[in-house]
Amino acid sequence: MLDQAAATSLVRYKTWADRLTLAAVAALPPGEAARERPTLFKSIIGTLNHSYVVDLIWQANLEGRVHGFSARNVVNHATYHRGWVSELFYQIPAKPPTTDWNIFLQRDAGG
C-alpha cells in the first residue's frame, strides 16, 4: 500500500506528464492528432480518449461507485499509453515530449 506522500508524488507526476503530452499534441500540425494511424485506438486522439476513459473509471473506483471494471493502477496505465502517443509522434514526424519519471523528479526537486 502506498503512503500519502508516495501517492501524492505519483498523482503530481501523472498531472505533469499529461500536461506535457497534451501541450505537445496541441502543437502538432493541423489534423495530425486525429489522423488515422496503424494503432489500436486509430489515432493520437483515440489513444488519449482511452486514457481519459480509464481515468474516469479510476475516479469512480476512488469514489466507491460501481463501474464494472477491476481497479487498475492509473498512473502506470497512463504512462503506458503516453508511450503509444510518443510512438505515433515519430510517424508524423515530430519529437514527443519527455515524460520520464526521473525527469519529473529532477524538475520537481528544482522547484
Image (spheres, rainbow, N blue to C red):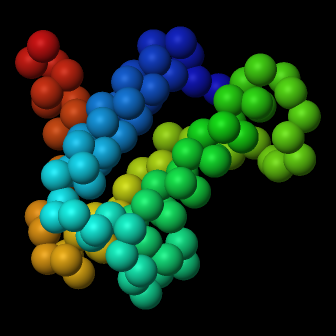
Residue 62 place in picture, x, y as percent? 73, 24
* Residue 55 falls in image quadrant: top right
Q: Nearer the viewer, residue 68 or 48?
A: 48
> Would you say residue 13 is visible in this rendering?
yes
> Which residue is pictured at 22% across the width and 64% down the height?
30
Q: Quadrant of the N terminus?
A: top right
Q: Is residue 34 left or right of residue 103?
A: right
**Where 50 sits versus 21, above or below?**
below
x, y percentage for residue 75?
Answer: 50, 41
At x 43%, y 72%, the residue is: 43
Q: Is residue 66 left or right of residue 53?
A: right
Residue at 18% over, 60% down: 28
| Displayed quadrant of residue 10 | top left
The spot of residue 107 in percent (x, y) is 14, 27
Residue 80 can be seen, yes or no: no
User: Where in the figure is residue 81, as x and y percent of width and height?
Assistant: 45, 59
Q: Which quadrant of the figure has residue 109?
A: top left
User: Is 1 positioned to the left or the right of 88 in the image?
Assistant: right
